[in-house]
Amino acid sequence: MISTASTPPVHFWTPPDLPGLDFDPLLARLLHEEPVARIRLPNGEGHAWLVTRYEDVRFVSTDPRFSRKAVVGRSVTRLAPHFIPLDEAIGLADPPDHTRMRRVVAGAFTARSMNRLRDHAQQVMGELLDRMERHGPPVDLVAHLNRPFPLAMVSTLTGVPEEDRAQMARWSDAIISATAGRAASERAKGEIADYFTALLRERAAGPRVPAQVRPDGAARPDDLAGVLAEGVEAGALSLDEAVALAVLVQISGAHAVRNNSANMVYALLTHPAHLARLRAEPALVPRAVEELLRYIPHRNAVGLSRIALQDVAVGGVTIPRDDAVYVSYLTANRDPAVFADPDGLDFDRAGPAHVAFGHGPHYCPGAALARMESELVVTSLWDRFPTLRLDVPEERLRWQRRALIRGPEELPVRW
């Protein structure tokens, strides 16, 4: 244990509603001045440690002495009034249970599945851009592209039919927002869990989509609902675990990509030299997307915490047993010890990989899908509308308030 005299102060942190891609000033200060700090967020109880440097973030993210499972049942200080995942979610599991669940989920992210989704993504993108063209400028890009595109893609992945997707979006918005209130968010969690419980039971009775064929000739489900239903039938997952997995993928796949793809478009529209280069060098798109993922502060505050199972030294500070610990992937991506000119957007950047999708066992399972969607947005949008530009002055754009994932409310554009 550390002595009271050496214990750092607690920073009361109510993350501000920041415009554009402005970086949280407290996060920036702690990264440079107090890289292992204590914080208290607006909800929950007590304090937590916040780790901000790249190497320390990677260390905490992989060291088994920091447990996600131990968070369940504890009112850890947090931004939202409620916990986003269901208790059985993979994000709140530790190995070996996490490894077991992750292995099942991987069945929905095979190379064949991703190729099928890429073909479907091209079709969905073309239809959305056709509608934009028919509508004519100006249009709100969030409403016409950034919201419907990832919702369609993740719903295809999870097996949610088109007629249910509007309701799925409403549930997701209530769960992921800090503004809906705890009661409304918890009610939405219950309803979306009931939906996926019914869907998985239905899929267990017979797949609704064409199946893949295993090397042994047997059929294999080709979407997440089918994969999870098969996992439950085989005893690899409980039904509650499978439902929690489906809910997590559905919410994060729709909401996070919606906001981050809008942020990417905004970043390019407000960095005309970068956009011009990307238009001149289309082969640069994958590298540019990686840099945008590193550069964009895609969330407010922090995500899920961990609990220290014993005293652990991190960055020269001893974190006591039973204390909650957060890592900031945002600050890790801006660590000047790792990234030269970290606050600049540099499509020629080389070196260590960003941690926008996390690190270690809890690395986002949908990262490949999110990358593919982002690359398609960046490429297809300007291929169709090469003169695309903002329709209002940058300072008049409205950004989401009290959001967990940052993004514009609207993105008015014309061409």
Image: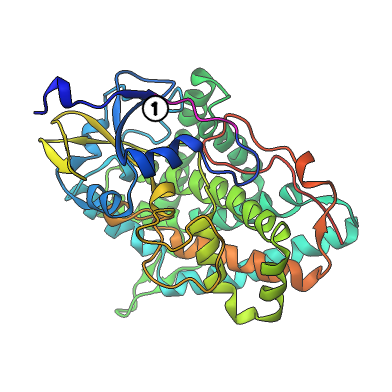
- Return the residue nearer the eye: 324 or 214: 324
- Which residue is depicted at the point 11% across and 28% down? 2
Magenta stretch?
12-17
The residue carrying mark 1 is 78
Relative to 279, say whether 247 is above or below: above
The stretch drawn in magenta includes residue 303: no
Residue 171 placement, left or right of 350: right
Is residue 67 shown left or right of residue 290? left
Quarter of the image with the N terminus is: top left
Magenta portion: prevailing SS class: loop
Q: Quadrant of the C terminus?
A: bottom right
**Residue 224 figure quarter:** bottom left
Q: Which of 178/7 is in front?
A: 7
* Residue appearing at x 32%, y 18% in the figure: 45
Q: Is residue 73 above or below residue 373?
A: above
Type of residue at label 1? Arg
